[in-house]
Image: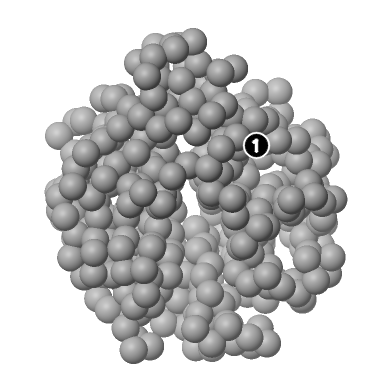
Amino acid sequence: MATCLSATACLDGGPRGVDPGEIEPLNPPLGEGSLWPGLSTHGDKVVLSWQESDDGDAWTVKTAMLDDAGWGPALTVANSTEERGFFVNWADFASVEILEPDLLVAHWLVRGPDGGYDYGIRVAQSTDGGLTWTEPLRPHTDETRTEHGFVSKFLLNDGGTGLVWLDARNSVDMDGQKGTPGAMALRYRSLDPDGVPGLESVLDERVCDCCQTDAAISASGPVVVYRDRSEGEVRDIYITRMVDGQWTEGTPVHRDGWVIPACPVNGPAVAARGDELVVAWFTGVGNERKAQVAFSSDGGVHFGEAIRVDDGTSLGRVDVLWLENGSALVMWVERRPRVAEILVRQVWPDGRIGEDLLVTTTSAARDSGFPQMIRDGMGRVVFAWTQAGNGGRVRVARTSEDLQ
């Protein structure tokens, strides 16, 4: 049984592993039909992004900024009427990242002429708080009618932007016919500070088809985590690191040995503090659904043992961040008999774990999406999730006190 983080969401008044005070609901300027939030932070600014529908075929990507003065207005990043229409998906969704105080980078997904899983990525930047955006660019240079998505964005040392994504161009032959044995690949491309793209490169030629990627900046440079896919269908979590401008070959965060012949749609999350890393992920090895974390003290070269954090019925959908006391806060979704719960728990590198704390109840259905969390400039944790049903609605809440 989870102990109480939110007085409005939890009926158990037992002791807490951390005492963040109550969760305070925040009221961003959302319209009806808002879905699948993203969160990003820089200094005292929190950026929320989401997708919104008009109950028809039209979709928009929107963003709003929260600071000490409250929420700014909802700003439109992109509208689906500008191209063939958006690819809208519960697991592969648009987002906006604040990488510098004056740099927002957004991505969204656009349908190709074949529809279905023929879709591509568009990226745009804003240097005026989201009021205006650059002309969208396509980071992948191929013309194949295949999947391109699950994007992660991060700041480079030169002030440019790094982009990684999953790319299925090798699943078609030279004539564009699908069904050939090529696998999904993990690809990378940089944008310089002026938004000019560099060359594409392949980080891993064979990865899981539809699990999210994530990235963080350690003291030694950028790191990217993803779900690998071996020839024997082992789908464990891997990490690649940028060292002296070059990406290392991917290595396992932990050898779970999870053999599964299909994608579990459950990617990892990573957070960095100097050269300390924490990675959270879901695995189903041994027919047990687990949410796990592992720590590294050398920028991801080596990791400690996996630490299980769930209550035994995890659905994954993880996120993770560092706290000032040297622990990590990990979030995941746990299935219960009638509902699902979004839970968080403190975990220390030495293996100690705190109480599991309930953020809110939710649905196990796909349309509830992937919950998100970040720490704001005051150390408070901001949570965002989709309340499923009746077209959906994004909810945002924040701890009333700094989480140490």
Q: Amino acid at mark 1?
A: Val
> Image point 18% across, 47% down: which residue?
350
User: Residue visible at 67% across and 50% down?
Assistant: 48
> Is residue 135 visible from the viewing direction of this image?
yes
Image position, residue 322 (x, y; %): 40, 52
Q: Position of residue 222 (x, y in %)?
A: 40, 74
- The residue to which callout 1 is attached is 396
- Direction from residue 114 to residue 319 in the image, left or right: left
The C terminus appears in which quarter of the rendering? top left
Q: Quadrant of residue 369?
A: top right
Q: Secondary structure at mark 1?
A: strand
* Relative image position of residue 178 (x, y in whole percent): 44, 62
* Count of numbered labels shown in the rendering: 1
Q: Is residue 34 left or right of residue 274?
A: right
Screen quadrant of the N terminus = top left
Q: Position of residue 35 (x, y in %)?
A: 66, 39
Snapshot quadrant of residue 136? bottom right
Q: Residue at x 53, y 67 (%)?
A: 153
Q: Is residue 179 visible?
A: no
Q: Using a 10 Å C-alpha cutoff, classify the residue at mark 1 as few (fewer than 14 neighbours), some (14 to 19) or many (20 or more).
A: many
The type of colouring in the image is one colour
Work out whether 82 lies above or below 218.
Answer: above
Residue drawn at x 77%, y 60% is: 77
Depicted 337 relative to depicted 326: above or below: above
Depth check: 219 or 111 in front? 219
